[in-house]
Image: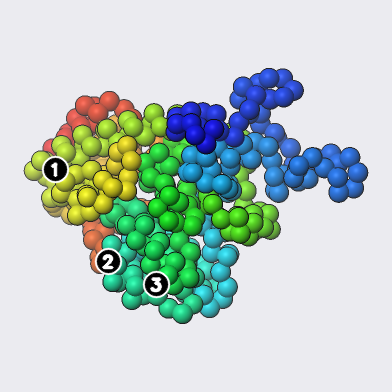
Amino acid sequence: MSEAGFGTRAIHAGQHPDPTTGAIMTPIYQTATYAQESPGVFKEDYDYSRAANPTRKALEQNLASLEGARHGLCFASGVSAEAACLHLLESGDHVLLCDDVYGGTNRLFHRVFAQLGIRTTLVDMTSEQALADAFEERTRLVWLETPTNPTLKIIDIARVSEIAHQRGAIVCVDNTFCSPYLQQPLSLGADLVCHSTTKYIGGHSDVIGGALLTNSDDLHERLKFIQLSVGAVPGILDCFLLLRSTKTLHVRMQRHCDNAMRIARHLEQHDKVEWVRYPGLESHPQHDLAMRQMRHGFGGMVTIGLAGGLDAARQMLERVRIFTIAESLGGVESLIEHPAIMTHASVPPEQREKLGITDGLVRLSVGIEDADDLIADLDQALA
């Protein structure tokens, strides 16, 4: 299966017809525990479902295959997967976090794990010099998103990994915006990949989940111990739903990319839009890097700046009909949101200002509806 194409692995990797009935779909093993033949004698690693469950195991193997990883672990949410990574650290350790990240990530690092003595420095990782200068003696982890959220900066994963490894730090890439279909950070030198499987992997806005993927046996064993001990594992029905979703990931992502490119090019010419950020546009500052680092397309996320600031943004968001005002992203339906008020409200105002998360900034999660209808909806909302 490792030699098969992405679409084939999406549908088959980690899954086999049920040996009892021949069922094609992996069953929902809705069980908390398992019978033991004798005290401490049980099948494979199935003694308790927090430790292992066949439905979850199939999902973990499927996601590992799609990311080109040896190991996969699934969690109850994206931030619980992030928290497991931070549990690898000790009090006094130092983390470098890219300056433009999901607001919940910023909150987790600065307001939760800071209480445990883990220090975090924000860095613009599009600058190699800024990154190199930020390392300290106890820097143990470098965490980045690319494209970043919400300003869609592109960070050179291979170069960041090289710099971090020279200094003894591990690199984790949040690959949520791309999914494994568009970008595979492990092949570029990263040690860990994190996903909010709620987003493109789930794709239908009906499940919450997270995942960590790695090629490192050591990191996998340490993280599996944390997964078992902390217990933030996904429900089995959620795993089943995610397995359903990965089967169409490649098809959905291609449509997301096609629609987003059309909308980005259209909005770039719109007189009510001051600027558009989309990695596929030649106007994007890191377009050439995106061409090298991303595959098949540039994702479904588009960020725009509106003339007129908050009033113009609020009016646009209240007038859309097909786009829905909502947090989250990556579903088949198109969503629109205002980061400064919604997803990034927990980011301090001075940091938002420095990053350019202004009152006129609007983030689009472009779905897989007919592109002409989406463009017409945006036009009437901006009129």
Tell me: residue 18, above or below residue 141.
above
Residue at the farthest left position: 271
Up/down of 193 relative to 167, above or below = above
Image quarter of the C terminus: top left
Q: Say few, some or many: other residues with alpha carbon within 10 Å of mark 2 (under 14 / 14 to 19 / 20 or more).
A: few
Q: Quadrant of the N terminus?
A: top right
Callout 3 amino acid: Thr
State whether residue 69 is above or below residue 121.
above
**Residue 73 in view of the camera:** yes
Q: Is residue 272 left or right of residue 44?
A: left
Residue type highlighted by circle 2: Ser
Residue indicated by mark 3: 121
- Sequence-wise, the earlier of marks 1 and 3 is 3
Say whether residue 103 is left or right of residue 112.
left
In the rendered view, would you say 322 is above or below 167? above
**Relative to 205, 90 lies left or right:** right
Task: Point out the residue furthest to the right here.
Answer: 38
Q: Indicate which disc residue 127 carries.
A: 2
Residue at image location 49% in from the left, 57% down from the top: 191
The residue at which mark 1 appears reads as 268
The span from disc 1 to disc 3 (Cα, nearest Å) is 34 Å
Query: Looking at the image, which residue sits at the far front?
Result: 3
**Where in the figure is residue 96, as x and y percent of width and height?**
41, 69
- Disc 1 is placed on an element classified as helix
- Give whichever of 140, 27 is nearer the camera: 140
The residue that appears at 49% across and 34% down in the rendered structure is 3
Eye-nearest disc, 1 or 2 = 2
Q: Quadrant of residue 144?
A: bottom left
Rendered image: mark on residue 173: none
